[in-house]
Amino acid sequence: MRIFDQIDPGNIERRERELWLLAIAVIAILAGGVALLMYFRIFAHAFVLTGSSVRTAFFAFCVLATLLIAYLMDRHIVVRHLRQQLTEALERNVALRHQAGADVLAALPGFNDFQDRIAMEFLRAANAREPLSVVVVLILPSAVVSGTAEAVSAFGDAGNALKRRLRPEDSIFLIGSGAFVILLPGVSLAEARQSASRLEEGLLDASGASNRFTSELQVINYPQHYHTVREIEAAVGCLVPEGSDGRPEQSAVATAATYTPRALSAIEKST
């Protein structure tokens, strides 16, 4: 029996159709066989069975068998039509969810905007002698989600989860495929780590029960780790994964390569 129970999920529709055809064919064969036997019994010896009730019963049996087969075929068509409608509705909902995720990502500012904003925030922090923290968030989709349209939806949900836990003065940027940067003006290193913990909790909720993605968060702080804007940009640039769709510009990557050893050592100390 285990041999017959091994069904490929991709062939469920075909197997169901074959089962329906088999059931209708078996019912039709049995009904036809019984009707054939009854026919010879009734009409071949009509002189013995002279009552009209026997012939009426025979024709009633034939009509009922025909109606039963027609009913099964009609139910099969109705169920198949309803299933097709449900499948189309599910596909529409999935497409809308993917589009919503893409819209969220498209609305986020990119790496160039991040460079402009961090220059202003750094100047303000340096003049006011206040700290400035940057949180780099990397979203790593699971093997099931990676490379599919669901990855875009997962990135969009992650972006929404991050935005809901930010202060009004904080800023979020999309610098790569699944790579976000968050600016936290006036936040010390300890406070930034606490904020990163809250952000990670939000990402865990957005991942869902199926664990669509995991996250990695790195905290960069001025003046604890770096003392210039170029160094902060370099540290952020070297954290963006290779082959990312939103990879920073080549000039930024070249600058990051200059400071890569220092950047990585400082980030490892911060975590």
Image (tube, helix red, strand yellow):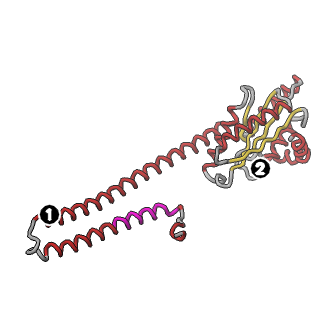
Q: How far apart are marks 1 and 2 (CA)?
A: 81 Å
Mark number displayed over residue 23: none
Q: Which residue is drawn at 74% across and 53% down?
A: 243
Residue 130 in which image quadrant:
top right
Whether the magenta-drawn stretch holds residue 178 is answered as: no
Q: Which residue is drawn at 21% across and 64% down?
A: 61
In depth, the one of 59 and 152 nearer the eye is 59
Most frequent secondary structure within the magenta stretch: helix
Q: Which residue is drawn at 84% across and 25% down?
A: 124
| x and y percentages locating residue 34 in the rendered image | 25, 71
**Amino acid of disc 2:** Pro
| x and y percentages locating residue 138 in the rendered image | 75, 44
Number of numbered labels in the structure image: 2
- Mark 1 or 2: the one toward you: 1
- Decide if residue 207 is on the left or right side of residue 24: right
Whether the magenta-drawn stretch holds residue 13 is answered as: yes
Mark number displayed over residue 56: 1
Q: Residue at x 90, y 37 (%)?
A: 225
- Decide if residue 211 is on the left or right side of residue 253: left
Residue 205 in which image quadrant:
top right
- Magenta stretch bounds: 10-24
| x and y percentages locating residue 229 in the rendered image | 86, 35
Does residue 57 sit above or below 102 in this rendering? Answer: below
In depth, the one of 41 and 127 nearer the eye is 41
| x and y percentages locating residue 200 in the rendered image | 74, 39
Q: Of helix, strand and loop, which one carries label 1?
A: helix
Q: Which residue has dot 2 on it?
A: 241
